[in-house]
Image (cartoon, rainbow, N blue to C red):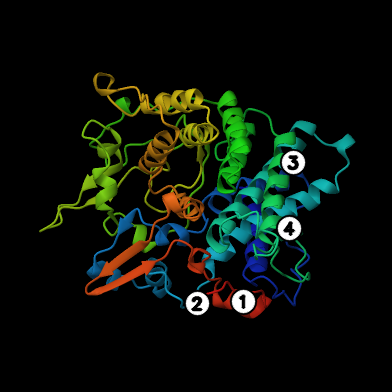
Amino acid sequence: MKNTTKLKVMFLLVVLASLTACNKFLDVKPDGKMVVPKDLNDCELLLNDYTVMNCSYPSASEVSADDYFLPATIWQSIALLDDRNYYIWSNDIPSLSVQWLNAYKVIFNTNQVLEIVAGLDQNSVNMEQYHQVAGAAHFYRAFAFHQLLSCYALPYDKSTANNEPGIPLKLSPQLDTKTSRASIQESYDQVISDYQKAASFLGNTPSGKGRPAKAAVFAGLARLYLDKQDYENAYNYADSALAVTSALLDYNTLNIYSYAPIPVFNAEVLFSATTSFSYPLMQGYARVDHDLYESYTASDLRKKIYFMNNYDLPEMSYDFKGSYDNTQSGNFVGLTTSEMYLVKAESAARLGNLTAALDAINTLRKYRFPPANFELVSIADREDLVRFILNERRRELVFRGLRWADLKRLNQDPKTQKTLTRTLGDKVYSLPPKSHAYALLIPMDVIRESNIEQNKR
């Protein structure tokens, strides 16, 4: 009870600070009787706040992606204007800042923790706990920064990365520092730096559910390097993650008739994280894209584990039920071994190592089909294999918060570019492959209070 009360007080301080937006500060200091975090146990309380640290990442990019569609009547019924606008890639600036502030709330917590850790005498603390706390803080900050980059920055292009705006890199809990946007290059470099520091502290076993360990760090780096199209590093880090933890969930053991068939914290999960709740992605609202649904063969277990018929008439459509968080409160955006097999497969294929690519993709697919229906993939042409793996990636990682980043990356290659379309009644909306709209607009009050640069339109 004492720890719970202490956590609530510390969380109140964090919320008060976070709600000031980026550069609007508290004029009144907290009352001296309030608990201010000061030691490793206080740090643990902050990092173990699962709701803040694991469950509030931006959903706007997933709302904007193409794995689903909304019937016009459902789109019109959504109360939040921002949600409706994200769906049609509107040029209207979002009025609510929760998508932005929740991620920076995570970053504020990690900055508090890292400031405390930096001031501790290492000769007088439990070093195992010290390493767990420092490593987790660097991991959470890297993960939050990467989530923000996926939403609010253009795709990584080494020829322009030093000049295009990335995100504000808040590296201190101090509220009286000027806020500005770092470049995309500086932003990616910071994520890499934080992940590498996390790897130097964390061991192979997490200190608790929801907390990261070394495999999660390697997986975060693999995901980041894939976004950068640095396939050598993406391959190496995916391979390193799988060297620590390679378990896959056998879909043959799951109940295909369940409304939530995939268990939370299952063997594949390296780090559990979800987005904040969003109406357009809610079960019963979002209809799975028809072409995507039809891309699964009849014997593919994912077709029945991920989706359920919603009996829409006159045209049948399907809802998503395959969350790795076993909930509908937000989309799972965490790190898993299944994602790492796909990163390894794609990177190996692009690097010309077809043997490694086939081994990775076949290892994953073995657990997605009944034994009698599983067939080894044996594609000999590199481009054909890359194409197959990309399609497999979309089938496997549907509604996992990765499609928007994948579109940004793949749109840089003419062979994989795609124009997105939405149809609402007689109105058709489109998003060209290299549109500036792939960097979502920063919320209005964040721009107003911080005076940072808005994304182009």
Q: Which mark is residue 447?
A: 1
The answer for how far apart the CA atoms under marks 2 and 3 are is 36 Å
> Could you tell me if the residues under marks 3 and 1 are in contact, i.e. CB atoms within 8 Å?
no
Q: How would you rate the neighbour count of disc 4 (Cα within 10 Å): few for under 14, some for 14-19, many for 20 or more?
A: some
Q: Note whether 118 is above or below 312 in the view shown.
A: above
Lower sequence index among marks 4 and 3: 4
Report whether 148 appears left or right of 37: left
The image shows residue 184, relative to residue 241, as above or below, that is below
Residue count near mark 1 (Cα–Cα under 10 Å), binned few <14, some 14–19, many ≥20: some
What kind of residue is marked 1?
Ile
Residue underneath mark 3: 197
Residue 35's mark?
4
Q: Are marks 2 and 1 in contact (CB under 8 Å)?
A: yes
Rate crowding at label 3 as few (under 14), some (14 to 19) or many (20 or more) other CA atoms within 10 Å.
Answer: some
Which mark is on residue 93?
A: 2
Tell me, yes or no, whether the two marked residues, 4 and 3, touch with CB atoms within 8 Å.
Answer: no
Q: CA distance from mark 3 to mark 1?
A: 31 Å
Residue 2 in sight here: no
Q: Are dots 1 and 4 in contact, CB under 8 Å?
A: no
- What amino acid type is highlighted by mark number 4? Val
Q: Residue at x 22, y 75 (%)?
A: 426
Point out the frontmost of discs 4 and 2: 2
The secondary element bearing badge 1 is classed as helix
Lower sequence index among marks 1 and 4: 4
Give the Cα separation between the discs numbered 4 and 3: 29 Å
Q: Is residue 445 left or right of residue 413?
A: right
**Distance Cα–Cα, label 1 vs label 4:** 32 Å
Query: Measured from the top left, where is residue 435 in percent x and y?
Result: 48, 66
Choose between 388 and 223: the one closer to the eye. 388
Q: Mark 1 against mark 4, which lies toward the viewer? A: 1
Residue 265 in the image: state x and y as whole percent: 47, 35
Residue occupying image coordinates x 48% and y 51%: 413
